[in-house]
Amino acid sequence: MPSDYVTVEVVADHPCSALWEVLGQPELYPRFFRGLGTITRLSNNTGDPHYSISAVSAGGHPAEYLGRLVTNRPEEKLVLAGVGEADSWVSVTLSEADSGGTKITVVLAKPQGVEFGGQHGRTAIQRWVREGLKRIDDYLSGVPDFPITTGGSAAGLQRKILSTLVEAGVVEASHPIRGLRQLSRLRRWGFTVAGGYASAAARNPDNIAIIDDRTTLTFAELYDRSQRLAKAIAEMGVDCQATVGIMARNHSGFVQAAIACAMIGCDAVLFNTGLASRQIEQLVDRHDIRVLFTDDEFEPLVQYLPPTVRRISTISPTDIEGRTTLDELIENAPKGHLRAPEREGLLIVLTSGTTGTPKGAKRATPAGWISIAAMLSVLPLRAEDTMLISAPIFHTWGLGALQISTPLRATVVLQDRFDPEKCLQAIDEHRVTALMAVPIMLQRILNLPAKVRAKYDTSSLRIVASSGSAMPGSLVTEFMDTFGDILYNFYGSTEVSQAATAGPTDLRVAPTTAGHPPLGSTVAILDRDGLLVPRGAVGRIFVGNEQPFHGYTADTDEPPEVKDALMDTGDVGYLDADGRLFVSGRDDEMIISGGENVFPRPVEEALAALPQVAEVAVVGVPDQEYGQRLAAFIVPKPGARLDPAMVRSYIHQRLSRFSVPRDVTFLTRLPRNTTGKILKRLLVDRVSH
């Protein structure tokens, strides 16, 4: 055999049929062979099946290849050849071993420029193949994988925390008096939002803290106003035993109310602006709320609350007769020293409510510098950045962005409502360096005509961070092709907070990945019995970190399961050979169709890649013959032509037959909540009825 070919032979105890379940599906190879991102089967009505292959090239850069399946003899031989690359191919042959078991023979013509575990040469290639085959053997044998933890030993973690804070500019040399004042205020208010803004005001009092649609405030002004507001509501009888509600859009009034609550030590319920009046009434009653900060636009929803609930308008002037405004409270606030609270108040964030009534999740004060370093370890924010927070700050993601802005002394730009063109205009006008958004916002930016996008200079952007819902791989690639490799995808939940983050390099190689856990965090994949599964196997995603969740506010709401200090996210997924996390979907979204486990998300990803599709959602619905089936809901792009038969044929060529949606419905829009998550229960009801 020519010297530029490499052969690896191993003997496995598993039968050919079991090995072929993995080796016969190139799409599964990235789960077991390092350096591969995704392998996707392409639609091809004629000839041999083709695959799009993303990998890490020499030098650590993403690369794309096209492969063609030239031989496919089930349980015997597979040959995948490179398209347009002479003599570039890999063959996998299965045969009976003389000593029993199955002999696996892999012959590989070295692809030019591909990394093999970070090394080159014949020995590196052989090692790469053997390690991948060992992972497949462990997978079939059920050998449990280890959880992935970022940070190492306790001493190593502390060093990484410090180096991360120094690199971001959170910790640096400063004027001695200002430095002491900063630490003093942090000790006084703790790592709350009050402590963050108080310490920033001590460090850079004259820097701009917030720019919104009506005003601009320095750190000193914001700190002073928040203190006076805290004194004013304390005069109303609000103390550390009380609970205050905030129902407002993204503006400085929301921020001042949240800071004031933290200064008093009372709990603050952050109301979702998309709630119905009945839900608001239930939450006010459940939390015994006596003071509610609210924008005037929500008056129709709160007007029938009992008179015992004092309502304060967050924006001046107000058109509501007899209503006190936040500005009036600040102007008339009593003078005097505001003592540190006896307890640190909780921020109560409402779950998204995509499957029912939102629950109140109690988030305690972040556990010191580790929570700050965790986010900065995966997001290259720097001191005095300018951050446009478009994600709602009543949501965990927007709130987290606001909280991380304070140790950085960043200028935060807020807009009452998200508008894609106004977002670009703000980036241009304020030279925004970081945009914090949810996926549907990025999609709406891309939906703008190219000539509209070209009107605004967005070259100042170094970071676009997205979270709150799954981001389709096609959106990831299109956004980076348009704005550059500046995209970061955060995966987490209200309960576990930040679980994993994928940066631009990972997203180029594997656009659907959730990434790696941040500093000080652990991710594990467990089965139904709470035991670790093998690498590459799908299981329940559990996360552990130092961002404490203190349960739900209602005693009837059971908290997520905790196993060995790791919390159940409610999602299922797997870890690939490089330790990247992939989310297959919600645990309760998996369906069993004809005895096969099927997840909607791979079908959504495949359909989202069609050029005719603007938005798509896939749900499981009851089926008399198969038990359950998939139903697809598609929003076509303007002028696009698409019919159910085309959709089914397309999926049939790319995925298993049980993944083909029996129902295909075309809509003008998908139902979403205020954070952009699709309300799938409404789609299920549509088919069921």
Image (cartoon, grey):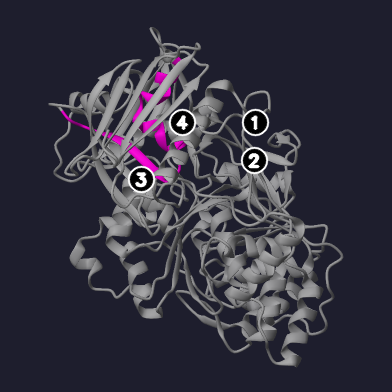
- Give the residue type at disc 1: Leu
Residue 649: horizontal and vertical position, in percent?
21, 24
Whether the magenta-drawn stretch holds residue 306 is answered as no
Task: Looking at the picture, tell me which residue is in the foreground, 342 or 604.
Answer: 604
Answer with mark 3 or mark 2, whichever residue precedes in sequence: 2
Give the quadrant of the N terminus. Answer: top left
Q: Is residue 365 left or right of residue 447?
A: right
Decide: marks 4, 1 in contact (CB < 8 A)? no
At horizontal 44% and vertical 54% (from top left) the residue drawn is 438
- Say the numbered circle drawn on residue 473: 3
Tag 1 or tag 4, which sits nearer the N-term? 1
**Res. 169 mark:** none
Return the residue found at the far right: 342
What residue would you read off at disc 4?
681
Q: Residue at x 87, y 65 (%)?
A: 342
**Which numbered disc flags the more N-terminal residue, 4 or 2?**
2
Secondary structure of the residue carrying numbered label 3: helix
Identified by mark 2, the residue type is Pro
Give how far apart the Cα atoms at labels 3 and 1 are.
Answer: 28 Å
Above or below — where is 641 with respect to 443? above
Q: Secondary structure at mark 2?
A: loop
The residue to which callout 1 is attached is 532
Helix, strand or loop at label 1? It is loop
Q: Amino acid at mark 4?
A: Arg
Residue 311 seen in render: no
Part of the protein shown in magenta = 18-44
- Label 3 and label 2: CA atoms lie apart by 26 Å
Q: Residues within 10 Å of mark 3 (few under 14, many from 20)?
A: many
Number of other residues with Cα within 10 Å of mark 4, as a class: few under 14, some 14 to 19, many 20 or more: some
Q: Nearer the viewer, mark 4 or mark 1?
A: 1
Q: Which residue is mark 2?
A: 147
Give above or below for 301 relative to 74.
below
